[in-house]
Image (cartoon, rainbow, N blue to C red):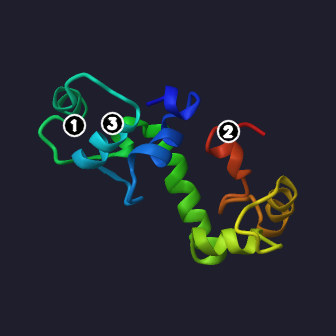
Amino acid sequence: MREKGDGNTTLAWRRYFDSDGDGNLSFSEFCGALAMFGYKRDALDLWRGLAGDESLVSLEVVDRDGAAICDYFADWCLKVKGGPLEVFRAMDSDESLSLTPQETAMAGGQLGRRDDYGEDADVKIGLGS
């Protein structure tokens, strides 16, 4: 999974595996991603190694740190604008449905990057500054 996310398990999870975006991976989603990658081995055996007897797997099981970052970001989005979509809309100043580096940098200052404790959010979640 990390290989498909350019070294980032959470990126691969969001791009290829959790196709409905509900934060959980079903066996069907898992098999769909494996088929897309041309995986030829026993998918059920691989699933059991990941999920055991569970019917769903959360990102936290696969990448605890990535899940914590996503949860932190979701909470921040709710706090500053009411949710991720609202944050995106606030950042997308030209309404192109994509973000340029300039829009991202400008929005960082407008929306704020500090948490309730006055710490830089990117430092708190371990991304460096």
Q: Which amino acid, mark 1?
A: Ala
Q: Residue at x 55, y 55 (%)?
A: 72
Q: Which residue is mark 2?
A: 127
Q: Which residue is mark 3?
A: 35
104 and 125: which is toward the camera:
104
- Depth check, mark 2 against mark 3: the one in front is 3
| In-image side of 25 versus 67 (left or right) | left
Whole-number angstrom distance, CA of label 2 to CA of label 1: 28 Å
Provide residue 33's location: percent of width, then percent of height: 36, 40
Provide residue 106's location: percent of width, then percent of height: 87, 62
User: Disc 1 on helix, strand or loop?
Assistant: helix
User: Disc 3 on helix, strand or loop?
Assistant: helix
- Chain-order first, disc 3 or disc 1: 3
- Depth check, mark 2 against mark 1: the one in front is 1
Q: Which residue is mark 1?
A: 51
39 and 122: which is toward the camera:
39
- Chain-order first, disc 2 or disc 1: 1
Q: Residue at x 65, y 45 (%)?
A: 124
Label drawn at residue 90: none
